[in-house]
Image (spheres, grey):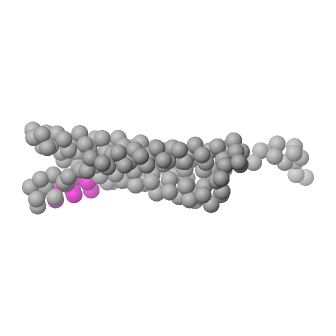
Amino acid sequence: MQRTRIGSLIWVALVAVPIGWSIGRVVDATSGALPPIPWVLPLLLLFLAIGMLAGARAVRGWITERRFDRRIDALRVARSVALAKASAYFGALLVGVYAGLGLLALDHLDSPMGRNRAVLSAVVVVASVVLTVAAVRLERAGEVPPPSDDENGGAHPA
């Protein structure tokens, strides 16, 4: 599995902005109201980010600090890295979609509901960025460093 490129995550977020704006436009045109943004979403995203950071700390401790007394095996590390990769792309997608919805809500700042949706979409964007950063950190923590010469007992292959 290759390392997630930050440029790819930015690209996903940028492509998702017009998608979120378009979805909001369609919902606004058909129902006469902006699409609802659940207030629990940023809390859930921050909860996931905390889990990712805790996982990154455990994995990094297991790999780099050689704390093999912990009950983490290689399969768990691989699953954590795969989850982190998926979470990074999901977070980038949410950044773009809710940025698009937030841009649409800027047209409705004269109403309290429009202001509420603009603020809530900004909070979701920030929480999604935090999730994406935490996921990338977990993925990077799962990388195994190359072996050093000290592990070979100082012997050089002939």
Q: Name the quarter where the N terminus is drawn.
A: bottom right
Q: Is residue 32 left or right of residue 16?
A: left
Q: Please name the residue shown 26% across and 47% down the image.
A: 39
Q: Please name the residue shown 36% across and 53% down the image.
A: 93
Highlighted range, magenta: 19-26
Q: Position of residue 36 (x, y in %)?
A: 20, 52
Q: Please name the residue shown 15% across and 43% down the image.
A: 114
Q: Is residue 130 left or right of residue 26?
A: right
Q: Is residue 32 magenta?
A: no
Q: Position of residue 129 (x, y in %)?
A: 39, 43
87 or 25: which is nearer to us?
87
> Residue 75 is drawn in which quadrant?
bottom right
Q: Is residue 119 above or below residue 97?
A: above
Q: Please name the residue shown 65% across and 57% down the image.
A: 74
61 or 4: which is nearer to us?
61
Q: Is residue 145 visible?
A: no
By secondary structure, the bulk of the magenta-drawn segment is best described as helix
Number of marks in picture: 0
Q: Position of residue 24 (x, y in %)?
A: 19, 54
